[in-house]
Amino acid sequence: MRTKVEHQPTTYAYLPYVSGVTDNLKKTLSKKNIGVRFRTVKKIQQELPSNKDPVPRLLTKGVYELKCTCGKSYIGQTGRSIQCRIKEHQRHTRLGHTDKSAIAEHFHTNENHKIDYENIRVLDKTTRYYPRIITESLEIMKNKNNFNREDGYRLSNTWRLGIPRTSDLECHGQPSSADVQPNIAEPRLDLCKHY
């Protein structure tokens, strides 16, 4: 009596499933010790362009970064538009409300510092609260060269193991995970009127 010995494939091929074709290909590849995993072919809807106009990045909710001329940055999150929150930071800075904004406090306690309001980095666009505050906390953890008052949402120390700091990455010549988005001219919309 002969027993069938099964070998674990050493590599895998991921192929779109086409009835009759990939079944035969799977048999051929399995003889060469290559496993086959099937994936679905893209649906027509995925191939068609979206008919929606893209929302300008500053009109979205999310996590953002503002840089100062001293090299430090502020990382924040908002459930309103980022543009609206930036205008609040500008107003608090102008009026000297250092208790209402870490940006205003940094500006007023350090001479010759200037906040770069023209080059705002949108780190993440999300409407949901918990993903937004967790992303903010992770970004603060990654970039220790910040002037945030707090570390954001308190995360388990387990998160720290997998989060390299931005300064550590830059020392090794690797790019930061939060790539700089191109500075695209945004329409100036005043959605944050305060009466």
Image: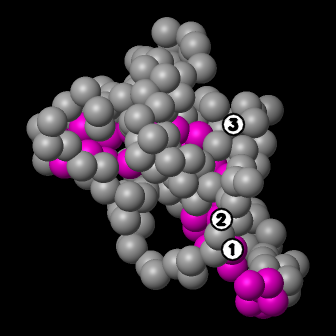
Mark nearer the N terminus (1 vs 3) = 1
Residue 67 part of the magenta-drawn span: yes
Mark 2 highlights which residue? 59
**On residue 55, which mark appears?**
1
Q: Residues within 10 Å of mark 2 (few under 14, many from 20)?
A: some
Q: Is residue 12 above or below residue 185?
A: above
Q: Position of residue 77 (x, y in %)?
A: 59, 40
Mark 3 highlights which residue? 131
Q: Which residues are magenta?
A: 48-77
Q: Residues within 10 Å of mark 3 (few under 14, many from 20)?
A: some
In screen coordinates, is 181 left or right of 107? right
Is residue 120 among the parts visible in the rendering?
yes
Q: Quadrant of residue 71?
A: top left
Discs 1, 2 touching: Cβ within 8 Å: yes
* Tag 2 secondary structure: helix
Number of marks in the image?
Answer: 3
Which of the two discs, 1 and 3, sits closer to the camera? 1
Which of the two discs, 3 and 2, sits closer to the camera? 2
Kindly identify the amino acid type of the residue bearing the numbered disc 1: Val
Discs 3, 2 touching: Cβ within 8 Å: no
Foreground residue, 181 or 18? Answer: 181
Q: Quadrant of the C terminus?
A: bottom right
Residue at the image position 70 percent from the left and 60 percent from the top: 193
Residue at the image position 51 percent from the left and 12 percent from the top: 158
Kindly identify the amino acid type of the residue bearing the numbered disc 2: Leu
In screen coordinates, is 53 left or right of 67? right
Q: Quadrant of the N terminus?
A: top right
